[in-house]
Amino acid sequence: MKGLLIKDFKIIMNQKRFLFLYLAIAIILSFSMDSSFLVSYIPMVGMLLILSTISYDFNDEGFSFLMTMPIKPGDYAVGKYVFSILGVTAVWVVSVVLQFASFYIRKLPFSLSETVMVDVSMLALFVLIISFMIPIDIKYTPDKGRIVMFIIFGFVMAFAVAGKGLAEFVSNKLGIILFTGPNPFENLSPVFFVIGLFAICIIALAISMVISIRIMQKREF
């Protein structure tokens, strides 16, 4: 496991020029863009960079070489989750630090509770994306995995737009309001909100990890 983490870390560090450019852009954006953009853009690019390590493992029979080491196929899957979560969390922490530095230097007013809830929500979102992407990348190779991801998200977005359009049509033409009542999240405690988010993330990660381990165990090397 330790060897797999070191391997992925060295792959990331071999892209030093991109990392320096990425950091420079992040610093510039931290003082010119909206703070919520920081905690979405920076972790997103970091997540894509981290997931790109799977591509390196597919190149030049990388998987076959890795399986000659004293590791099991399931160890590779678990190691990829550990590295991805640690990496995304580290990048997220950097984005949050830049965000609050921007608040302080630019003297911008902000609500601490709302900011923390938004930041934590972004971290949870990227963890969920990781849970979704790793099994696809391992199964279909990262290039095909991106295509599968765009197709699935395309269907989800189309379904959401169609649902919204249907609700507006029914409301305007027939006078029937499909969704009524107060917003259930309006008075939700930030503590319960964070606990609920991470509970969902843990469940998603557990299911995703089981799927990835089974994919690796069935793969022929």
Image (cartoon, grey):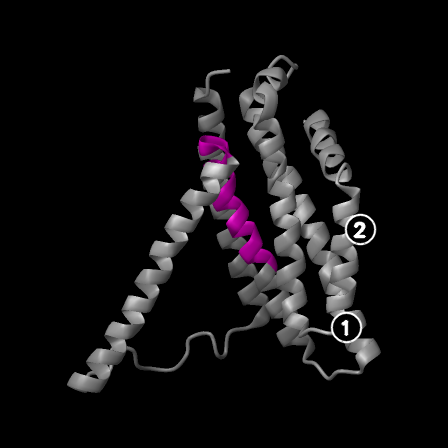
Q: Position of residue 79 (x, y in %)?
A: 62, 32
Q: In the rendered view, would you say 29 is above or below 181?
A: above
Q: Dot 1 lies on which element?
A: loop
Q: Position of residue 112 (x, y in %)?
A: 69, 76
Q: Nearer the viewer, residue 3 or 147?
A: 147
Q: Residues within 10 Å of mark 1 (few under 14, many from 20)?
A: some
At label 2, the amino acid type is: Phe
**Percent coordinates x, y for residue 22 in the rendering:** 74, 54
Q: Amino acid at mark 1?
A: Phe
Residue hosting label 1:
31
Whichever of labels 2 and 1 marks the residue nearer the N terminus, that label is 2
Q: What is the secondary structure assignment of the residue under circle 2?
A: helix
Q: Which mark is residue 20?
A: 2
Q: Which residues are magenta?
A: 123-141
The residue at the point 20 percent across, 79 percent down is 170
Does the magenta-highlighted stretch encompass residue 12? no
**Is 199 situated above or below 161?**
above
